[in-house]
Structure formats: structure tokens, C-alpha cells
Amino acid sequence: METSDAALDDGLRQRVADELHAAGGLRVYAASVSSADGKVLALARDGRARRLLAVMDPSCAAACHLPSVARKDFVCGGSTIGLLILETSSSALDWLRQLLPWTVPTVQGLATSAGLGDRLGLATPGHLRAAAGTGVVPFVAQQSIREMTRTQRTARQVMDDATWGVFEAGWRTGFGSDADHLKQPADIDTCSAVGFTMYTIDPGDHVCSRADTMSASELTAAMARAAWGEFETSQVAFKARYLGRAFRLDGGDPVRFDEDTLARAMVKYGGAIRHTVRMYRHLERARSGRPFELEVSIDETATPTTVAEHYLIAAELKRLGVRWVSLAPRFVGEFEKGIDYKGDLTVFRRSFAQHAAIARTLGPYKLSLHSGSDKFSVYPIAAELTGGLVHLKTAGTSYLEALRVVARKDPALFRRILDFTFERFETDRASYHISARLSAVPRPSQLADGDLETVLDGNDGRQLLHVTFGSILTSKSPNGEYLFRDAFRACLIDHEDEHYDVLSHHLGGHVLPFSRRR
């Protein structure tokens, strides 16, 4: 059975998968069949459990401390071959990554890309189906610290689940990973330890929104108090860099600052700039020469990021030595969770063009679309105006589409979940800016089984189910059992092909407008 991985075409992979199935009795994912270092490797399903299959010397498994479930011998080409059935443990995955470098995330630079977050750890093969053939690089290991907290998953679990999905799908063309919305140096350390490659810094806690309404005297006092030493400049030198100049943009209108505009932008975002610099320098130390890339997120603010604010933030970060591949302003209009863009698309287009011009001029770097799920009306605009210098970030929509599968395949479970969300909505919506009306969503008792998934077709229902994901995935009964999580995952595993198809269809609608292979 020895062969090189490069020599394994789809037909041969399927034949090897059939042989492994006959030997081990498990359902083998043919796309995962690989060969490395004289070993044949594959991923299989054993009921609801994943198993790593390895045709190799059993002593190697013992030496590598790989937990073995079983060994089965079979005859191939007249020779008796040993098949090891291994647990899909973290140690097994570390070993697999050494053998198959394509299972390790890498930095992706300025390639057009899409973050495809997975809150259940089961979506990656469906996400990869959506990205296939588009030329858009998938970031399949993506989760924010807030999401990890709310789903009670660790950074290691997020990375491992995505990697098993990459292996299952046989995705050999590269993928990214995004440690999203990091606020503290400790967040960087946690995610660096498990191999994340992109780090999204969120300095939102250091934005002074009150600067928008400060009086002239308040602004003057705030500028005087600014930590100019940390900016490695003086107030006089800072003003001289910006006042009385026209900053020409590649494909946009020039940016000009007057005293008031400059002071408000600096007072508002000065703390965020300083925090980003501190986080970047900590990240450099944490990575110790290992490759990484940075995204800067300034999207979670009370008001849209103006062109002047964007220019100032980027120019000052660049001056202070920060290097980044993408930046997420808060764009005009509303990017609410789980539904399409709300706002005037003509105004959006005009504003977005200016932001794209800044990114070309001061970078180039990508513009990042946060809360990007289901913003179908803006995708063509973003793709056109950036020329592909764009990163789309999604997460919640994949969770919602997983619920669609539950609605179809386990109506009773979906009814229980929907009923529970009504209880949790007012509490769970507190940290989100959404417009959902609870009164607009039908109660489970009002719906026939065949109509349950229509809840996911309306804005109010999508947002109701979106913001309550943490409660659904972590709530337990008095005896400590999950109310929904285990049954939810079991349903998706039992119907995984449909789950992947649903994700491929829905996320394909997100990725295709950014395709680089039309």
C-alpha cells in the first residue's frame, strides 16, 4: 500500500479508503487519505466518534504516545498489513501536523480571504466546500475570546476541531487561523501557544467616544494630557505632521485636517492606538520569530469611523512600527448580526471607496468586514472597490444554518431550543446592537414541523437565535447534563452530509462575490 501523497489522485484515494473500510469496518473519508514518511493515514467515523487510521509499524504509535483504540490486520497485495485505529487526541493531531504540513495554518498576507467561524467544531468541511474553486482563502480556525467564553471552548479546541476538519476534507491548498478580538496580552499568549497565525487586536475599550461631543476647551485639555511620550513624539510635532496639508489618496479624495478634526480624532483614538502598539509589541515577543499577521479592529464603536479617523489611526500605527494585513473600520449604516446590511447603499459605496483608498495608500492592506454574515448587498461593492484587498469575517450565520439542519431532522429538539431562546433573549441581547422584535417571532406551538425552519428565514428569528447561542450551548440541567449541546452536536453528526451541504450553499453565497477565479 506504500505510495507518495503526490501520487494519490481521487480515484486511488477512494480505492485505499475502500480497503481501509473493509479492514476496519469504519466509514473512511476518502479525501483525507494521505501518505507520508512511509505511513498511510486517513480519518474515519466510528459511530459519532472520529478515528485516525494509520497503516504503520505499531511501535511507532507507542513511541509517539498515540492512544490506540484497536489494531486490525488485513491482506493487501499478498502482504499482511497492520491497521492502527487511533483516538483523535491532541497528541495524535500534533503528530499528524508534523507529517502533513498542509494541516497547519499559515499566514496569508494580502490574499482575498474569508473568516468562517465555527461555534460547534463541526463546520469546517462545509466551509471548505463553500470556498472550493473560488480562490478565496478560508480562515477556518476563527473564534473570538468572547465566543470561546460563551461556548466554553478553549483556543486549543478551536484549533484542533478546525484541523480535523481540514484533514477530513483533504484541503491541501492552505488555510488561515484568526485569534479574534483580543483585548489583553494574556489573550495573545493563549492563542499563540496553540499556533494561531493571525491576531485581531480589539482596542475598543480604549476609544474615548466622548471626544465627539467635547467642547473646545475640553479638547484642548485632553490633548495636553495625552501621553505624548508613548507616541514617541510631541504635541507640536504631531500637529505639524497633519495640519495644513492635503494627503492624497490612491483613487480617493484628499484627506485634510483642521485643528478641531485632528484633536477630536486624536483624543478619541489615541488610547486605542497606544493599546494596539503595546499589543503588537507583545505579540512580536510572544511569537519569537515565528510568522504571524495582524488585524486591527476599530469596528465596535458608537459611531462610524470617519475617513480622517481612519487615516490618522493608520498613519500613526505605521509611524510607530506596527505592521498589519487588515483593518476593520466601523462602516456607515448598520452591520447587525445575522441579517443583511441596513442603510443607504449609495452612501455606503461612497464612504467605502474612501476607506479602500486609504488602505491602498497607507498599506496596502485589506479592509475587514466584521459582522459580515449575510451582508449580501454589500459584498459586490466591497469586492469591486478593494480589488480583492478584503477579508470577510463571519461566524454566527454558520451556527444559524446548523440550527436549520436541526429544524429539519429533529423538530422536537429545535422546538425546545426555540422555546428556551424566548426566555434568554432579553438578557443575552445586552451585548449586541440588534433590532429584533420578540413579538415578531412565532412561538414553537404556532408552527408545524415543516415550517420550523422559516424562523431562520426572517430577520427577527435569526437574531433571536443568534444572540442566544451561548446559553443554548452551555446551559445545563440540575444534574449537570447539557440541555441542548450534546443533542445538537449528535444531530449534526448523524446528518453531516446535509449539514455540509447547507453550509456550502449558504456560505457559498458569502464567498462567491469575492471569487478570484471568475
Image: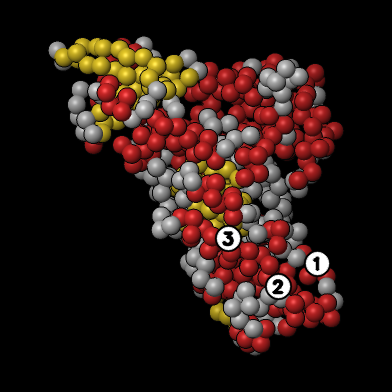
| Residue at (46% x, 50% y) in the render | 197
Measured as percent of width and height from the top left, residue 84 is found at 32, 19
Q: How many marks?
A: 3
Farthest residue, direction left: 78
Amino acid tagged 1: Arg
Q: Which residue is mark 1?
A: 210
Which numbered disc, 3 or 1, marks the residue closer to the eye? 3
Q: How crowded is the residue under tag 3: few (<14 C-alpha within 10 Å), some, or many (20+)?
A: many
For residue 279, the mark is 3
Residue 400, image x and y in percent?
64, 33
Q: CA distance from mark 3 to mark 2?
A: 21 Å
Nearer the observer, 434 or 327: 327
Image x and y of residue 253, in percent: 60, 76
Question: What is the CA distance from the residue labelled 3 to the residue labelled 1?
Answer: 24 Å
Up-down relation of residue 72 to residue 327 (above or below): above
- The amino acid type of the residue labelled 2 equals Ala
